[in-house]
Amino acid sequence: MPRPIQATIHTAALRHNIERLRAAAPGARLWAIVKANAYGHGIDRAFEGLRGADGFAMLDLNEAQRVRDLGWRGPILLLEGVFEPRDLEICSRLQLSHVVHHDDQIDWLAMHKTHSPQSVFLKLNSGMNRLGFTPERYRAAYARLGALPQVDEISHMTHFSDADLDDGITKPWARFQRATEGLPGERSVCNSAATLRYGSQPDIRGDWVRPGVAAYGGSPDFPQHDAAHWGLLPTMTLSSKIIGINELAVGATVGYGSTFTADVPVRVGVVACGYADGYPRHAGTGTPVLVDGVRTRTLGRVSMDMLAVDLTPVPKARCGSEVTLWGQGPKGALLPIDEVAHAAGTIGYELMCALAVRVPTTVL
Ligand SMILES: *Cc1c(COP(=O)(O)O)cnc(C)c1O
């Protein structure tokens, strides 16, 4: 028997989340964001659940190729645009739309030989100071692009740094409005947090929304709101089994560094899951976990291949009992990935993306 750890990708939950996001932004078209190999789910594994979207957006040309190979003929958008001039040839061949955030990319387009003009998303730096033209330079970039025979459609986009905070988009939204006012072209500004919070406002939701983590059942603004608040379902489950049991007397410790000491007698389950599987090592004693669908807590340090759990609330647990590290447990029990991430001082995004390749993964 292989080591009992397993990941499961839930196609029905992906579909549910896409529908939920559509309802949150009625009338908008929706990019399914599949960067980072579909947030760790695997593009191939997530594709079926996401194909109800209107387009796929990612960073890498090979991810775009993958989506075309899976049979997708609709829109594809490269969110960081092209990295060198010859990438434009692949854009022409695969019919990819791409973000333009830098003057060099316009120079490359001007030199690109093609018979089929390309669709670009001109990106405004609305204050995040990562990618994009500043408001002062935005219209000049638009004019340059508009003069190129290599370009037919120019859409407008920006990315919010603080959409997960109350009043987090007021300033960048005003900058975007001012920079794009009166210019023809479609608009795309909303990530998950903005789609869920402002998708009902037609001017903000624009023509395309770009929800990433919410499609994968993560809450973009945890702990203020959890996934259940937003009506999202976990799309990735990490599960394993108990492979050892120890009865700790008072004063006994568990794991490296002896960071947990029993102050009452406690029954401890050893689980076949560790940081080499993608479980966060920074998750200390008390991180939530399900055993046979019953909520309990981890004890002590996470090792490379194992971690320990408190079996006090599950007295019937034994070797072979099912452990849910995050996602969908037995008997309808759920353990949001955001809670585990929060206990480890990170966000659900990072845990999804860090699922290790050694974990066998099935698609439901
Ligand atoms: C990753 C990304 C998104 C999605 O962000 P989430 O917070 O996961 O919804 C949207 N737009 C751009 C440009 C991105 O890079």
Image (spheres, grey):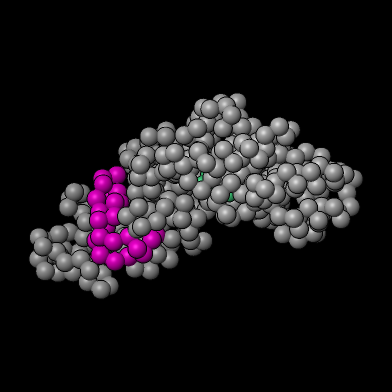
Residue 123 painted magenta: no
Q: Pick whichever, 221 or 17, lies toward us.
A: 221
Q: Is residue 122 left or right of residue 47?
A: right
Q: Is residue 188 left or right of residue 112?
A: left
Q: Is residue 128 left or right of residue 71?
A: left
Q: Pick whichever, 186 or 87, lies toward us.
A: 186
**Residue under the point 29% across and 51% down:** 288
Residue 214's x, y, as percent?
A: 48, 41
Disc tally is: 0
Residue 304's x, y, as percent?
A: 38, 69
Q: Residue furthest bottom?
A: 257
On-image quarter of the N terminus: bottom left
**Residue under the point 82% across and 52% down:** 109
Residue 295 painted magenta: yes
Residue 86's x, y, as percent?
A: 80, 59
Q: Is residue 48 visible?
A: no
Res 274 quadrant in image:
bottom left
Q: Is residue 257 visible?
A: yes
**Residue under the point 78% across and 53% down:** 106
Q: Pick whichever, 69 or 263, lies toward us.
A: 263
Q: Which residues are magenta?
A: 279-302
**Residue under the point 57% across and 54% down:** 129
Image: 318 above or below 196: below
Q: Pick whichever, 77 or 102, lies toward us.
A: 102
